């Protein structure tokens, strides 16, 4: 029975104070921070030695690709970084060609808005992860207003390609020291999240939130392990540990949280991967036959993933274009700042977009004050300017994981200093333009988010409910089968677990959307409960829960 009604949902409350609260830093906060410095420093210092800092914007395009894919296994990271570099070069090429063919600011803003929408849609569809489309949009939008001729485009693109190749090397270099680091971290996170849920025994305070967090962490660990087809011995050992986390998620009352946390601690170091005992495996036989089938299954086509993102892409295009036009009407010399501000707002729903807007405004305003303090030092000479930008690059990546606004405090003065690579400018004028563009971009961008409704959010819940029910029925039939195919239970369990996680993510995204019909909250809760009961049944059928705390 559905609890949905044909009425339109009311405007949802918007958070204020909570959006500025600081979280815990990422476990690997220093990795992207060090990587971006290692990627940016050599090209910029080379240009400094040659006296051509005016070309730094083009090398920065390639260097900033080092910010991406730090959570991916290295085989998958190699592909992801290559695609990021190609996407960055593609956006830069379109921007430079457009800038060389027209001087109409209105046309350039329009091109920038369309590029931002395309970059947002592709980044979301491919789930490339932080920093998403924002860095791509920053580079392409700034390039639209950089002076240049058509004949200079190949040379500028060559600089970006060279810096991008160096960024790829920087991103891959840690794999020489710790080749399975990303998978180990993902597995450790799944074990810790499962332990937190196990401590509630499935019924204690906060068990629902802990269960959702554990399910998402386990799913992310599987995504990490299944992102490449190379099933090495360490990867197989990690798969078994993720199975233990899955078991704890399905049967929390039988799980040993202490053992799960102990395994997670061992994974954080560089020692051998712990090998949990799996019934019937004999310590050597690979019982995870379902992994092979999942690795062989075709990936979902990109076009099918882009379809549901149409409302978000339309919001981005409209909001960025209007923000740029308003900035032009106000006489601001750098309308691309307003465009980028608007582009940075758009999240999965209106409520999250509002939160990001508050974070962006606060971070940028504080960052402008930081620029006022840093500018005198940076203006001591070109070397001081380059070193100041490097320090701010490190600070931005080190802090942004705690809260977006805190990282923006470093990003804002860095962006202002980058505009001075060609020649120093009046700080007061830069600061004024940045404040105006920030306010314009945030206000106009949010209005566009409210104006462009996302009616598909409710439809996606229905599709997710159907997918979960189908996966649950398939798993239930597999559980009751007298002689299921080898690996069938494992595949069915993982398919069902993924459907449960997808339903929760889809519901959370739709819950923050405005102007849509009421959500079928009762159906969602009942479907989740049924899904977890069936997951527990698959675990019991496999006999995995009987030795949760055992080790080989």
Image (cartoon, rainbow, N blue to C red):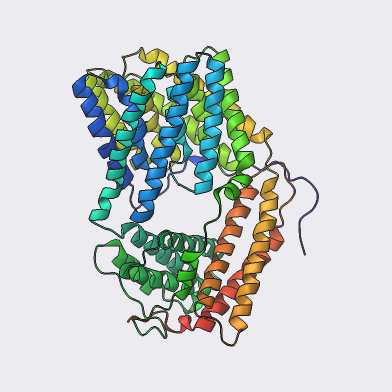
Identify whether 336 is placed above or below 331: below
Residue 245 appears in which quarter of the rendering? bottom left
Which residue is found at the position 29% from the left and 29% from the top? 389
- Percent from the top left, x then y, of residue 300? 55, 55
Would residue 367 appear left or right of 448 to someone viewing this image? left
Of 402 and 28, the residue lying toward us: 28
Which residue is found at the position 76% from the left and 61% from the top? 2
Residue 397 appears in which quarter of the rendering? top left
Identify whether 123 is placed above or below 76: above
- Percent from the top left, x then y, of residue 359? 49, 36
**The residue positioned farthest toward the bottom in the image shown:** 482
- Percent from the top left, x then y, of residue 360? 48, 33
Would residue 428 appear left or right of 337 to someone viewing this image? left
Would residue 184 appear left or right of 481 to someone viewing this image? left
Which residue is found at the position 33% from the left and 67% from the top? 232
Would residue 509 appear left or right of 128 to someone viewing this image? right
The image quadrant where one finds the N terminus is: bottom right
């Amino acid at each position: 029975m559905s609890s949905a009604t044909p009425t339109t949902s009311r405007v949802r409350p918007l958070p204020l104070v909570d959006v500025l609260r600081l979280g815990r830093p990422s476990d690997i906060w220093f990795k992207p921070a060090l990587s971006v410095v290692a990627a940016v420093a050599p090209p910029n210092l080379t240009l400094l030695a040659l006296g051509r800092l005016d070309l730094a914007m083009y090398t920065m395009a390639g260097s900033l690709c080092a910010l991406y894919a730090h959570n991916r296994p290295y085989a998958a990271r190699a592909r992801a970084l290559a695609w990021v570099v190609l996407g960055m070069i593609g956006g830069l090429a379109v921007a430079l060609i457009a800038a060389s063919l027209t001087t109409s600011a209105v046309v350039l803003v329009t091109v920038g808005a369309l590029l931002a929408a395309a970059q947002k849609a592709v980044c979301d569809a491919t789930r490339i992860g932080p920093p998403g489309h924002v860095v791509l949009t920053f580079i392409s939008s700034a390039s639209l207003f950089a002076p240049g001729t058509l004949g200079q485009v190949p040379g500028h693109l060559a600089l970006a390609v060279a810096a991008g190749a160096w960024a790829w090397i920087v991103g891959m270099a840690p794999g020489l020291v710790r080749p399975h680091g990303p998978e180990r971290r993902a597995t450790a996170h799944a074990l810790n999240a499962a332990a937190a849920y196990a401590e509630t025994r499935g019924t204690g305070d906060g068990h629902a939130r802990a269960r959702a967090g554990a399910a998402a962490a386990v799913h992310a660990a599987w995504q990490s392990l299944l992102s490449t087809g190379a099933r090495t011995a360490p990867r197989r050992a990690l798969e078994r540990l993720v199975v233990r986390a899955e078991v704890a998620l399905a049967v929390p009352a039988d799980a040993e949280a202490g053992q799960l946390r102990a395994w997670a601690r061992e994974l954080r170091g560089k020692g051998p991967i712990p090998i949990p005992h799996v019934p019937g495996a004999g310590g050597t036989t690979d019982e995870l036959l379902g992994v092979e089938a999942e690795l062989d299954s075709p990936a979902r086509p990109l076009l099918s993933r882009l379809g549901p993102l149409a409302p978000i892409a339309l919001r981005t295009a409209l909001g960025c274009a209007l923000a740029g036009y308003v900035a032009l009407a106000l006489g601001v010399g750098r309308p691309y700042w307003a465009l980028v501000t608007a582009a940075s707002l758009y999240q999965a729903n209106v409520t999250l977009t509002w939160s990001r807007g508050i974070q962006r405004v606060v971070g940028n305003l504080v960052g402008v004050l930081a620029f006022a303090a840093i500018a005198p030092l940076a203006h001591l000479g070109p070397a001081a300017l380059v070193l100041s930008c490097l320090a701010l690059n490190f600070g931005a990546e080190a802090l942004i994981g705690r809260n977006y606004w805190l990282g923006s405090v470093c990003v804002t003065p860095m962006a202002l200093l980058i505009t001075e690579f060609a020649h120093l400018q009046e700080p007061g004028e830069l600061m004024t333009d940045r404040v105006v563009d920030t306010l314009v971009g945030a206000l106009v961008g949010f209005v566009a988010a409210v104006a462009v409704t996302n009616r598909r959010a409710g439809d996606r819940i229905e599709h997710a409910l159907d997918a979960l029910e189908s996966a649950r029925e398939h798993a239930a039939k597999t559980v009751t089968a007298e002689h299921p195919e080898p690996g069938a239970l494992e595949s069915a369990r993982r398919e069902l677990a993924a459907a449960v996680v997808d339903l929760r993510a889809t519901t959370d995204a739709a819950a923050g959307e405005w102007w849509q019909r009421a959500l079928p909250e009762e159906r969602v809760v009942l479907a989740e409960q049924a899904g977890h009961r069936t997951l527990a049944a698959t675990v019991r059928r496999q006999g995995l829960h009987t030795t949760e705390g055992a080790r080989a």
